[in-house]
Amino acid sequence: MNSLDTSIVIWLNGLSGNIKIFDDLMRIVASDYLMPLVFSLGMFGLWFSGKTPAQRVMYQLTMLVGISALSISNVVVWLFNITLERPRPFVEHGDQLNLLFYPPTDPSFPANPVAVGFAAATAAWTINRKFGWWMFAAASLFGFSRLYAGVFYPSDIVGGAVVGIAIYGFTTYFRRFLEPMITSFVRLIRGLSAA
């Protein structure tokens, strides 16, 4: 698997440097700003959506679970990082890669930005399938851009996606044990006119 991972990242990154506008676009998408903003705005929009008050409360509960999944995904990725400590592709194969992104210092597996993106996309998908697919596409593009930039291996991207989706599922299941506290929290927020 490691040789396949290496071959894919070297081949894909080898396409960089040929079309400047595509490289610039991948740098923008891979940045720490654009896609996290897209995920945040998507979740913010879903927080205030819903045609009826009951539907809006259900959406807000789902977004709270999604926000919790984002946080827990970060912790799970950190636990993987301190356990596995997989080097980044540009560390192991720097002479064969054209790094289009700043060199992150944390381990490679699983891809934290992808885990967060897929957790947000899964939350969106449970509310609105069509919008959720757009969020999944955005999370996939985020992972692809980091792969193209030479920052992650393909298995890091897949691992991040699995972590994000699985943690959302776990958080949804765990929510049952925290009721009615979570619903009361949403009602409190609604009482403060923030929902």
Image (cartoon, rainbow, N blue to C red):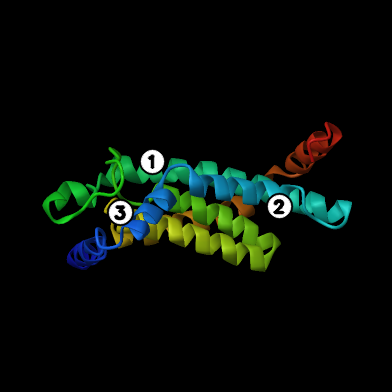
Which badge, 3 or 1, comes first in the chain's sequence? 1
Disc 2 packing (10 Å; few <14; some 14–19; many ≥20): many
Left or right position of 12 against 195:
left
Kind of residue at disc 2: Leu
The numbered disc on residue 167 is none
Left or right position of 61 against 139:
right
In the picture, the quarter occupied by the C terminus is top right
**Residue 175 seen by the camera:** no
Kind of residue at disc 3: Ala
At x 56% / y 50%, what residue is drawn?
38
Most foreground residue, 45 or 76 = 45
Helix, strand or loop for disc 2: helix
Q: Position of residue 10 (x, y in %)?
A: 20, 62
The numbered disc on residue 149 is 3
- Foreground tag (2 vs 1): 2
Helix, strand or loop for disc 1: helix
